[in-house]
């Protein structure tokens, strides 16, 4: 029994050690990765669920590590945040995504994830202005996805930046809605266009309509969105049943593997109406 316990704990510490080493390696390699541009963007479409019309592409970052292969953003974004490397990296994402969007029809928006660190510790307003100026992208085509945590900070400075962006035509979405320390107070004070219901709720939507608390939560968020005149996107839709559920709940927008996985910029043309190549 004691031996089994020891084995189990050494298995666990080995696992932790490996994971820590892996993270250390990633952290070490990040600066070089930025300098050598080992990153690229993939795009995942969002659709209007009633007409199944393409409304936007969300930019998602990928790291092609020369030795470790593709590293998931869930592993390296937190490291770029603690080291503040997310600031130059985030500016690159913004610039690249806006450049790519210039190749798409004007009706298709581009959504960019923005870390709370960018907002808090860089001149984010200026980064946006620079990008808009250098790319010439129409502001109304740019949608920033912020998490609740970056909004809850609610500093006057951040508010002013986001308000100015939105007043000049830009769009703002709350990402992972429902998973943070949701507070309804910011919903009426914050300049906002869209709520994105986190994948974790969508995954819990089951086919049976019985006692399903995820269903109630999703339903409530959709209703809240309608009442506040916000758009609502369900992310992480994987099945026909989830798709039907969300349609029946009158959720306007959807995104997920059921429709399309994230694709490279070059692969997008198959999704863009009346387009043969980029
Ligand atoms: P997120 O913003 O919530 O993005 C949605 C994630 O769910 C993406 O993972 C996407 O590929 C994945 N996904 C989409 N549809 C489905 C589905 O049907 N099923 C499942 N299982 N997954 C689905 P990804 O690309 O690995 O990104 C993970 C997170 O990393 C993102 O979550 C976002 O928070 C962060 N991230 C990605 N790119 C950037 C970026 O450029 N800047 C910042 N700050 N964060 C980023
Ligand atoms: Ca997002
Ligand atoms: Ca995010
Ligand atoms: Ca999410």
Image (cartoon, rainbow, N blue to C red):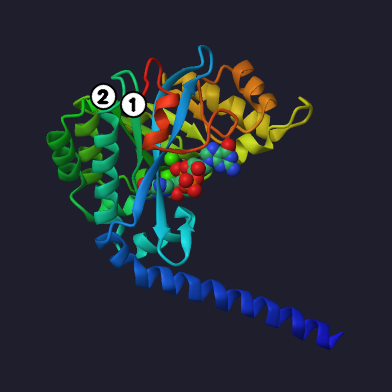
Q: Is residue 79 above or below residue 237?
A: below
Indicate which quadrant contains ligand 3: top left
Which structural element holds mark 1? strand
Q: Residue furthest front?
A: 276
Q: Nearer the viewer, residue 141 or 163?
A: 141
Query: Looking at the picture, does residue 211 appear above or below residue 178?
Result: above
Residue 272 percent across, percent down from the top left:
40, 22
**Distance between mark 1 and mark 2 Cα atoms:** 8 Å
Q: Nearer the viewer, residue 169 or 135?
A: 135
What is the crowding at mark 2: few (fewer than 14 residues within 10 Å), some, or many (at least 20)? some
Q: Position of residue 47 (x, y in %)?
A: 48, 22
Q: Going by the picture, which residue comes out furthest to the bottom? A: 3
Q: Nearer the viewer, residue 92 or 222?
A: 92
Q: Earlier in the sequence, mark 1 or mark 2?
A: 1
Residue under pointer 2: 140
On-image quarter of the C terminus = top left
Q: Quadrant of the N terminus?
A: bottom right
Asked whether, in this view, residue 223 is left or right of residue 93, the answer is: right
- Does the residue at mark 1 contact the one at mark 2 (Cβ under 8 Å)? yes
Label 1 Cα neighbours within 10 Å, binned few <14 / some 14-19 / many ≥20: many
**Residue 109 disc label:** 1
Residue at position x 35%, y 60% in the image: 81
Element assignment for label 2: helix
């Amino acid at each position: 029994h004691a031996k089994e316990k020891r084995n189990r704990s050494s298995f666990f510490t080995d696992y932790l050690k490996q994971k820590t080493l892996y993270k250390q390696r990633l952290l070490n390699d990040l600066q070089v990765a930025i300098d050598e541009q080992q990153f690229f963007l993939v795009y995942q479409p969002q659709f209007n669920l009633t007409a199944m019309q393409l409304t936007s592409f969300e930019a998602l970052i990928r790291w092609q590590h020369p030795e470790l292969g593709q590293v998931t953003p869930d592993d390296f974004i937190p490291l770029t945040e603690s080291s503040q490397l997310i600031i130059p990296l985030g500016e690159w994402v913004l610039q690249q995504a806006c450049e790519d969007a210039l190749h798409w029809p004007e009706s298709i928006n581009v959504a960019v994830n923005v870390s709370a660190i960018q907002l808090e510790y860089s001149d984010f307003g200026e980064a946006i202005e620079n990008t808009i100026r250098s790319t010439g992208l129409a502001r109304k085509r740019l949608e920033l996805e912020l998490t609740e945590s970056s909004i809850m900070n609610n500093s006057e400075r951040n508010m002013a930046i986001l308000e100015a962006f939105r007043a000049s035509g830009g769009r703002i979405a709350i990402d992972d809605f429902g998973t943070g320390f949701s507070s309804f107070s910011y919903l009426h004070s914050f300049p906002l266009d869209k709520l994105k219901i986190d994948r974790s709720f969508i995954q819990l939507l089951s086919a049976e309509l019985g006692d399903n608390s995820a269903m109630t939560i999703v339903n409530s968020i959709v209703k809240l969105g309608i009442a506040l005149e916000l758009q609502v996107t369900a992310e992480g839709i994987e099945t026909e049943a989830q798709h039907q559920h969300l349609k029946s709940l009158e959720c306007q927008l959807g995104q997920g593997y059921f429709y399309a996985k994230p694709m490279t910029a070059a692969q997008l043309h198959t999704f863009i109406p009346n387009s043969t190549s980029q």
